Amino acid sequence: MTIKNIMVIGAGQMGSGIAQVFAQSGFDVKLNDLSEEALQEGLASMEKILSRNVEKGRMTEGEKTATLDNITTSTSLDDASDRDLVIEAVVENMDVKTQVFQKLDEVTPEHAILATNTSSLPITDIAAVTKRPDQVIGMHFMNPVPVMKLVEVIRAIQTSDETYQTIEETAKALGKMPVEVNDYPGFVSNRVLMPMINEAIYTVYEGVAEPEAVDEVMKLGMNHPMGPLTLADFIGLDTCLYIMEVLYEGFGDSKYRPCPLLKKYVSAGWLGKKSGRGFYVYE
Ligand code: NAI
């Protein structure tokens, strides 16, 4: 199957980025959120990114206009009734995602694929609430979506080969690199990244080094573009803690226990860049 038209549910940080890359590649995109206000915010952030691309000569004014022209907005999931693919990027909450998938299963055409951008929830459980579990898959984009090459394509135990192949081809059509993984806690990206961040926090907790020193070691010594504590502040320390809890609970292995210092920062409301303070202070 070739995907021509899609719907993105959730016009937040990820959803607006996903809508942008599809529209830029010529897909017909409907962007859905609960309110007009949320949709306008999503479109405004997209417009800002596209204008910066024009200023920097990465795109012409005509390409910017064509991208925006490929996007229409919607506040009703019923509008998914003519879509080949729907990508859900709503809040990371299983109840909300379950409700969205049940409704999409009712309203979308029989051939439609239902994908989720979840960073930590089990795709197998999401697939199980629909009557088309073989057409449900994880399409995990990285932040910022227009910049990052990877799409981690996560197969639920029920996902068919045909669904996987369609999504792999679709990701390539966006100029992204799809990588196939199976559905286990944290998939590959967060299973490898989050324990590294958690361990970096342990080195601060145990007084091995200051945050700046930990980040310098990983930048200069391991060639990481950004130190793990800076990255944690960018991701949000609440999100890091949440994903560590998913790993800890999902595997029942003490190697995934969240660092007490991470828990303390989150309790204090020190969530990183978004709250003005995490391992660093932001003006
Ligand atoms: P966000 O909070 O920026 O956006 C979520 C949007 O979903 C909001 O605009 C909200 O109004 C909307 N929404 C909530 N319930 C809805 C519903 N029932 N129907 C339609 N819209 C609804 O969140 P963000 O960061 O964009 O994350 C979205 C998803 O992407 C989550 O599952 C998250 O785990 C995943 N993700 C996030 C990454 C990140 O770096 N922020 C990276 C990769 C995945």
Image (spheres, helix red, strand yellow):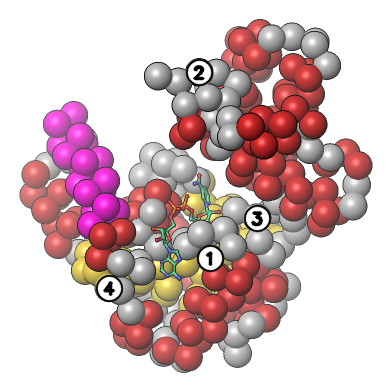
Find numbered disc 2 in the image and state the secondary structure of the residue it sits on. Answer: loop
Give the x, y percent position of residue 149.
46, 43
What residue is disc 3 on? 120
- Local packing at callout 3 (Cα closer than 10 Å; few below 14, some 14-19, many 20+) is many
Give the x, y percent position of residue 249.
83, 54
Q: How many marks?
A: 4
Q: Quadrant of residue 50?
A: top left
**Amino acid beneath label 4:** Ser
Question: Which of disc 4 and disc 2 is earlier in sequence?
Answer: 4
**Amino acid beneath label 1:** Thr
**Amino acid beneath label 2:** Val
Find numbered disc 3 in the image and state the secondary structure of the residue it sits on. Answer: loop
Q: Is residue 66 magenta?
A: no
- Local packing at callout 2 (Cα closer than 10 Å; few below 14, some 14-19, many 20+) is few
**Amino acid beneath label 3:** Ser
Residue 110 position (above or below residue 144): below
Please state if 80 lies on the left or on the right of 37 as rendered: right
Query: At 42% across and 89% down in the image, what residue appears?
Result: 107
Residue 283 position (above or below residue 141): above
Question: Label 3 to label 4, Cα distance in Å?
Answer: 26 Å
Give the foreground label among 1 and 2. 2
Query: At 55% across and 70% down in the image, what residue appears?
Result: 97
* Label 1 beta carbon less than 8 Å to ligand 1: yes
**Pointers 1 and 2 in contact (C-beta within 8 Å):** no
